[in-house]
Image (cartoon, rainbow, N blue to C red):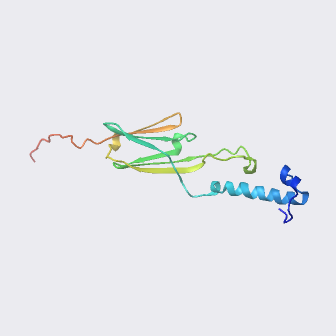
Amino acid sequence: MSKEKRSFFERLTGTVRMEDEAEVKTTKKAAISEQNAWIEEEDKDAELTVDVYQTPDMIVVKSMIAGVRPEDLDVSITRDQVTIRGTREEEKVARDEDFFARELFWGSFSRTIQLPEEVDVDEAEAVEKHGLLILKLPKLDKKRQSKLKVKTA
């Protein structure tokens, strides 16, 4: 804006002098690009939000993955942790400068969760229902015993 003091009428109505109009447009564009700067952060995975709880015989992990195809998900499980990775692809429907708000996350995401108990990796199950990923991880029964028969060699 110009260094001159704006008149009472200009301050009251919010009008801008013609010579100041170009500067106002430049300032608005700069503000919009600064506001959307986080969008341009590349090479960083967003952290997926999760709910993790237990039942007497399993650990359940839930996460919203709406807009992600099952083939774009990678779920890795070990006995004591689970990692969920994926990518949410954006359809180009408008130019960047045509957006009024951009709050949805597009790009890659991941989350590794340390499990409170060991789980049976072979019996784990992953289901997607209406954009909600549900992982059912059966707990290992450490108290389970079995008798081994001794064979002669």
Q: Position of residue 93 (x, y in %)?
A: 71, 43
Q: From the image, which quarter does the N terminus lie in? A: bottom right
Q: Residue furthest bottom?
A: 3
The structure residue drawn at horizontal position 73% and vertical position 45%, both measured from the top left corner, is: 94
Q: Residue furthest top?
A: 130
Q: Position of residue 15 (x, y in %)?
A: 86, 52
The structure residue drawn at horizontal position 77% and vertical position 55%, both measured from the top left corner, is: 28
**Quadrant location of residue 150?**
top left
Q: Residue furthest right?
A: 18
Q: How many marks?
A: 0
Relative to 101, 115 lies left or right: left
Relative to 138, 88 lies left or right: right
- 19 over 100 or under it: above or below: below
- Observer-nearest of 87 and 35: 35
- Observer-nearest of 137 and 10: 10
The structure residue drawn at horizontal position 34% and vertical position 42%, both measured from the top left corner, is: 122
- Observer-nearest of 48 and 89: 48
**Quadrant location of residue 41?**
bottom right
Q: Residue furthest left?
A: 152
Q: Position of residue 3 (x, y in %)?
A: 84, 66
The structure residue drawn at horizontal position 66% and vertical position 47%, both measured from the top left corner, is: 102
Q: Position of residue 23 (x, y in %)?
A: 83, 60
